[in-house]
Amino acid sequence: MPFLLRVELPDIPGSLGRVATAIGMAGGDIEAIEIVEKRDDGTALDDVLLETVEGTMPDSIVSACNALEGVQVVWISRYPAGGNLVLDLEAVEELTVDPDGALDRLVDLLPRTFRADWGARVHRAKGVVHGTSAAPDDLEFVDLEVASRLDPPTEDDVTLYAAARLDGNEIVVIGRRGGPEFVDSELARLGHLSALAVTIAAT
């Protein structure tokens, strides 16, 4: 069964190797690793996609990682996408295939690119004009200058929201149920990809 593990570790040579060894000894097989963020305090945040040996409990993998000096598991969850990681450059390549549909394609790609549950494009007056299958039907437009975390609606206390500006009348919103929280580097990527999609759509 695939799991996605977000782990904080020292940003020094050998740290990732120690984590990989601990995961392997606890019954996990690493499929992919992506650096989420490098921090000024000398730590890094990595996402690790892994498969577990039958009978392996995710708690044992978390414990094995947390036992390492300077290592802390931030979040772990099942990852139903089965290892289909889509990197930013691959997303941009897909956007360029059909410039006229780039903004809707961006929305379709965002959940996989950011390991979120849904994405939506929200118009100031029209509301949701395009969304993935799990996206809410009713999302409010928010004036934004830079990509930001959004406060969730009062009736939704399990989903984390982030959004980026497309233009003065549209934003894209993504939702991630249960975590992990959107970190600053993810917000920067979201803003960058959204700006690229706007540029591609205008060509």
Image: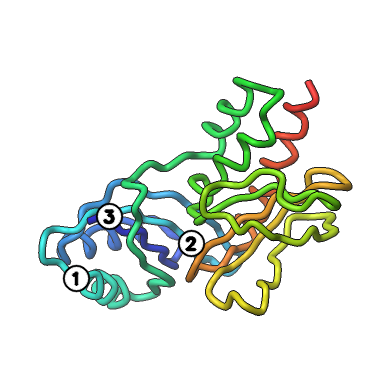
Q: In the image, which disc is placed on residue 45?
A: 2
Return the residue at label 3: 2
Return the residue at label 1: 57
Q: Earlier in the sequence, mark 1 or mark 3?
A: 3
Q: Residue furthest right?
A: 168
Between the residue at mark 2 and the residue at mark 1, the CA separation in whole angstroms equals: 23 Å
Q: Which color scheme does this rendered protein use? A: rainbow
Mark 3 crowdedness (10 Å alpha carbons): few <14, some 14-19, many ≥20: many
Q: Which label lies toward us, 2 or 3?
A: 3
Taking 190 as reference, is 181 left or right? left
Residue in view at x 70 percent, y 72 percent: 151
Residue in view at x 61 percent, y 34 percent: 105
Front one among 20 and 119 = 119
Q: Secondary structure at mark 3?
A: strand
Residue in view at x 60 percent, y 20 percent: 97
Question: Quadrant of residue 6 in the image?
Answer: bottom left
Q: Secondary structure at mark 2?
A: strand
Tell me residue 154's x, y (percent): 66, 79
Which three-letter amino acid code belongs to the residue tagged 1? Met
Up the image or down, 91 lies above or below 159; here it is: above
Q: Earlier in the sequence, mark 2 or mark 1?
A: 2
Question: Quadrant of residue 149 in the image?
Answer: bottom right
